[in-house]
Amino acid sequence: MVDRNYRKEEKEIDAYLSRANKDELVQLLKAKADADPTLRRRLSSKALVSSERPADIKEHKRIIREALGRNEFVHYRSVSEHTNRLEEAAAGLKDLAQAGHPREAADLIEFLIDGASKKIEQLDDSDGIFSGFIRGLYDEWGRVWSAIQDRDPIKLAENVLQRLDDNNYGLADDLIPAMASALGDEGLNRLERSILPRYEKWRGSQNLHKENPKAYLEQSRALRALLDIADASKDVDRFIELKKESGLQARDLQEIAERLKTAGRLEEALYYVEQGLSADRFLGSEGYDLPRLKIEILKGLKRLDDARSAAWEFFRSSPMTDLLESFLSLTPKGERERARTEALDYCSNRSDLSRALGFFMDEKEYARLAEMIRRRPHELRKFYYATLLPVTDAMEEEYPNVAIMIYRFLGFQILKDKRSKAYRYAADHFRKVKKLYTRIGKQMTWDRLKGRIATKHRLKSAFMAYFNKIPS
């Protein structure tokens, strides 16, 4: 009913707006702006921007300073609001660039970046909202610089280098990719020539991170910059050379394979994927995308049978919906239903619950999951409670006994670990156990369980205060 009324009201508003004259709408907007500071600031920023008038640098800087606020600490709860004001100022600069003033916009974005980079020292950015805003400013800075036709790549490279040197909070970590288009080959080459000596200065040094941490930091920053330059220049061989010099880990092998794949060098990409899988056979976080990458590369090489076999092996090791989909997509249409059933059967009978639970939840295969939990209740201890709670929601309606099993486990685990701050949640779990027992006609079973809990844990007064509130 609410949605229907809303749609009706929306149509009436649309009809009114279509017939209202401009002066009437302007008066409405001005009245709204008088009561809404955010709208007023946005309109003021829009009014500054026009291709028919010179950019008012002084006024834009005033807006930025006002958005940055006074020289005082910004508490955690106010950071989001503070960031929103700066985003409004940044939106005005984007409008300025689009109105035909990209150089002025670039200078003002740099002014905003400088101010925001100082402000970050005066606020609680626990959620990373403010730092994310600054990184976004660097991206916009790069886009605006790309629109300046008479830019000087050499001077721009020097500016980028200075910002990389002052990158104390990691806010400029992605500056080179952001500025790559604006720098062009000339700027990127100049930047590489400036950074390379810093890397070569410590090349071949052993245990540098222990013996000279400052030098290690300088070399690491230089290496990252050189890798970004190689990426921006699409120089895959240079990227591989630098990676090899720093020592290859599973993640490095994956990054190399991704770039070779993009370059169309599939056989070489496959070699590095195989190396990565050997280094990280159990598909840990470092090599998480290697299985998918191998399947894609094999498909690109037209080795479809090998791709299907690889998808099946990866699914067996780590059941996931996308791996199953890859396997089935490479299976003849007439055999897919049978193949899917065989895959689900394998997962039910051969996989650990720790690997199968997430997969069965994604596939909504609740019957199979319920049966697996009944057979392997001892494996519930492998899971964090936040993983199990969605399972209880899925089980309550059709598989109440399994939901009871999980709620009991969660409640008793809290009591066993003596987590006094979580006693309220333990009582909540037992309350749900009681509700489900009552629903399936096992009130006496609950009564016996309640008695045992009350007897065994009677000395946990904090828990009993919550537990005794469960109705009989």
Image: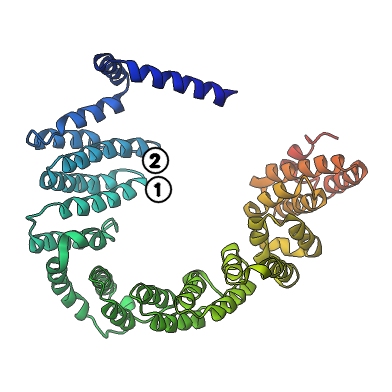
Q: Is residue 134 left or right of residue 7?
A: left
Q: Residues within 10 Å of mark 2 (few under 14, many from 20)?
A: few
Residue 123: x %, y % from top left: 32, 43
Q: Tell me the residue at 79%/53% (across/down).
A: 402
Quadrant in the rendering for residue 195: bottom left
Quadrant holding the C terminus? top right
Residue 17: x %, y % from top left? 35, 19
Marking on residue 252: none
Name the foreground residue: 337 vs 411: 337
- Residue 461 falls in image quadrant: top right
Residue on which disc 2 sits: 76
Tell me what residue is drawn at x 79 percent, y 60 percent.
371
* Dot 1 alpha-carbon crowd within 10 angstroms: few under 14, some 14 to 19, many 20 or more: few
Q: State whether residue 445 is above or below residue 279.
A: above
Residue that sits furthest to the front in the current view? 334
Amino acid type of the residue that numbered disc 2 sits on in the rendered structure: Tyr
Q: Which amino acid does the dot numbered 1 rest on?
A: Ser
Q: Is residue 323 left or right of residue 260?
A: right
**Upstream in sequence: badge 1 or badge 2:** 2
Q: Is residue 70 above or below residue 207?
A: above
SS under mark 2: helix
Whole-percent x and y of residue 389? 67, 50
Asked if the residue at tag 2 contacts the one at tag 1, i.e. Cβ–Cβ closer than 8 Å, the answer is yes
Q: Which residue in the structure is indicated by mark 1? A: 126
Q: Quadrant of the N terminus?
A: top right
The reply, left or right, for residue 212 in relation to residue 333 is: left
Secondary structure beneath label 1: loop
The reply, left or right, for residue 404 in relation to residue 175 is right
Residues at marks 1 and 2, CA–CA distance in whole angstroms: 7 Å
Whether residue 182 can be seen here: yes
* Residue 334 percent location from the top left of the image: 67, 68
